Amino acid sequence: MNLCILGGFGAESRHSTAASLWAGARRVAGLSTLLALGIAPDWCVAQVRGPLRTSPNVVAPQQIQQNRPVPAQGVPGATQDPLARYNGILDQPDQLSRIPQNDLVALAIRETSRRTLVADRHTPWQVVHGVLALRWDLRLREQPTGKLISGIEWIMGGAFYDNQPLWQETPYGGQGHPFTRPYAFEGHPTQFLGYMCLANIPLDYEVATPTKVITVRDIVQDAKMQVRTGREITWTLWALAHYESPDAQWTNATGEAWSIERLLKMQVDEPVTSGACGGCHGLFALAYARNMKLDMGESLRGVWVEADQKVKRYIEEARSLQNADGSFSSNHFLGPGETREFGKRISTSGHQLEWLMMSLPQDRLSEEWIQRGIISVARDLVVNRNTEADCGPLFHALHALVLYRQRTVPGYEQPKINSALKLAERQHKGKGVPSAEPARTTQTGRRSGDQIRRLSGEQEEQSALTNQRSEIGSEPSQDSIPE
């Protein structure tokens, strides 16, 4: 099975590169959302406005504050690592309640980040989920050298999978390779760019295809040209809300008039329970677009009010369906539900917490139910850090905690755009040609895709292909298969 190995990332942060891109970034989004996504320079912290501003004043609920922390002294193996004091109790679930919430979240992020994907073995769909959670910090293990390489540089540098390119030139620009089979390429239109825009990849960042070098700008243009009625638009809204202004309008390839507001209306009108992963991605896209609108200093009118009201309604739905242990319903919005299965629990709770972290105003992050949800997901990731896990749900849960840290820990995930715009100037330039023996996952019965687990480097070569169990609302949906 395709497994992850134990290893850190340690991506360097090049603030000068990020600063040079700041002027362009500010054009497409407001300060507070950009800061929450970890791409705003240090000097703008004091100027932040809006619902996603970073605040040092978010506190845990009273019962969390009263938990007795583990003392730093007397713990075997304690080092300068502030989290090392907890190494001795990580395998004792009943002792994890002694760890302060902020440290528990940090431990969950650290341990989950050590599940390393393998280039050319794990699928592009899986790697893109890793980029969603870890942005420019995602590192892949390159075969056969074992060297760690940039996940973004690999996926944008001309790699092939199943003897197919990850990106294609189109008459309108370029696109991610369309759906072929579950968990390989794009499961939904514009899914790759929708997830990767959280890394704020610059519009002029070059992307290799078999026929020519394109840019992120070309992928944005293609999404605008190919959007049409009857086609799934969740990830298109997600990506265009990031790279276009809230009032953007255009004409698609067939001459139809389109706009961000038309996409927003389509997403508002879609029943939540019919969407992928219980409707969580559609709600995330609505909240993300709404936040961009607010962060531009614009008031909400018309369809923007509808989007805001839908988001607020389902915040309360998620709250009402939350379980006593802090996990969210294993049936998403279909009704109450609990599960003892880690894979399903982290999928439903991780997806729910992820969209809530994009939707809630800053002053609600300290509410008791949200704090219980955060602790539940963080604890699950720590307790099951050595358990095989499906990549999609795992990285969505990790992303939820990353978003929470970005919104509550000043300075967390500051600019880390650590790759040159030009392919020729990057450390990892990609292959640019098909692999002679393309990696391929197996498909047996109802299971497809890959799982990952936390391994040592020596165990990596013993990994084999495995499959992934389907779940309620799992990605991708058949409706997303391009016509």
Image (cartoon, rainbow, N blue to C red):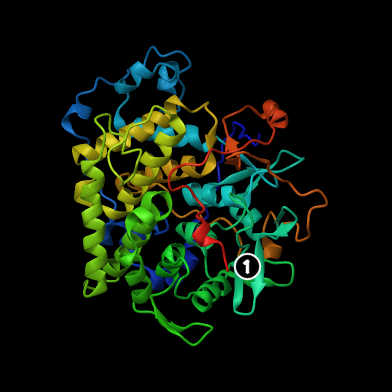
Across and down, in percent, residue 365 comes to 24, 45
> Could you tell me the amino acid type at mark 1?
Glu
Across and down, in percent, residue 139 comes to 60, 45
Q: Is residue 391 above or below residue 256?
A: above
Direction from residue 296 to residue 203 in the image, left or right: right
Farthest residue in the left direction?
62
Residue on which the image places disc 1: 206
| Residue situated in front as seen by the camera: 334 or 324 | 334
Residue depicted at 74% across the width and 67% down the height = 210
Across and down, in percent, residue 116 comes to 59, 38
Residue depicted at 55% across the width and 41% down the height = 10
| Residue situated in front as seen by the camera: 331 or 64 | 331
Q: How many marks?
A: 1
Across and down, in percent, residue 311 comes to 26, 58
Q: Quadrant of the C terminus?
A: bottom right
Direction from residue 246 to residue 65 in the image, left or right: left
Direction from residue 276 to residue 448 in the image, left or right: right
Farthest residue in the bottom direction?
255
